[in-house]
Image (tube, rainbow, N blue to C red):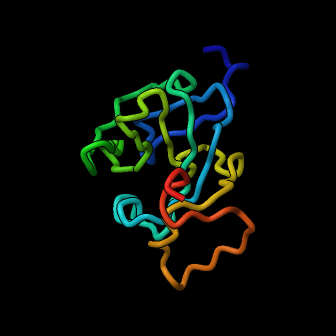
């Protein structure tokens, strides 16, 4: 990939695993679900979605954990940084942590999902749409 094609870059905390994206994400969200809360270690997680072919990886591969029958969560096997979320029913897409970007200011989530699990003391002051479950669940 040429340097001009790189739109976004990022990786894990230790630098073992790196990626470059050739496009901006087609969607980005704040997730409040319990699996993300526990898996990432934060009460809110910010994710961004790409087509698989828009992301090029370098360095060592991620290790994946099956957090459910259909979901794989990718993390660095050395430092433990949470980087990806893959749903097996949507193999053409990869969801990645906004926080893993070298410059997370470049991607701003535009909706909230699984707000039924949002902790009561977290107040996010924005006008973005909120969904009790996933966006397709209503």
In the rendered image, the residue lying farthest to the front is 138
In the rendered image, the residue lying farthest to the top is 2
Rendered location of residue 126, percent (x, y): 73, 69
Which quadrant would the N terminus be assigned to in this image? top right
Say which residue appears at 52% left-offset and 69% top-offset: 115
- Give the number of callouts: 0
Left or right: 53, with 25 as reference point = left
- The part of the image, by quadrant, that contains residue 123 is bottom right
Say which residue appears at 65% left-offset and 54% top-offset: 109
Rendered location of residue 71, percent (x, y): 33, 44
Which quadrant would the C terminus be assigned to in this image? bottom right
Left or right: 49, with 67 as reference point = right
Left or right: 12, with 102 as reference point = left
Residues 134 and 9: in front is 134
Rendered location of residue 11, percent (x, y): 49, 40
Rendered location of residue 21, percent (x, y): 60, 29
Say which residue appears at 53% left-offset and 21% top-offset: 53
Residues 102 and 86: in front is 86
- The part of the image, by quadrant, that contains residue 124 is bottom right
* 13 shown above or below 113: above
- The part of the image, by quadrant, that contains residue 7 is top right
Say which residue appears at 54% left-offset and 85% top-offset: 121
């Amino acid at each position: 990939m040429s340097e001009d094609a790189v739109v976004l870059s990022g990786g894990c905390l230790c630098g073992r695993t790196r990626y470059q994206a050739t496009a901006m994400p087609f969607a980005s969200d704040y997730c409040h679900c319990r699996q993300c809360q526990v898996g990432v270690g934060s009460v809110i997680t910010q994710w961004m979605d790409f087509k698989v072919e828009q992301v090029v990886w370098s360095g060592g591969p991620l290790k994946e954990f099956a957090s459910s029958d259909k979901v794989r969560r990718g993390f660095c096997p050395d430092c433990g940084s949470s980087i990806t979320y893959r749903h097996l029913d949507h193999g053409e897409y990869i969801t990645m942590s906004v926080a893993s970007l070298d410059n997370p200011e470049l991607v701003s989530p535009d909706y909230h999902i699984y707000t039924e699990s949002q902790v009561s003391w977290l107040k996010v002051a924005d006008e973005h749409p909120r969904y009790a479950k996933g966006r397709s669940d209503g």
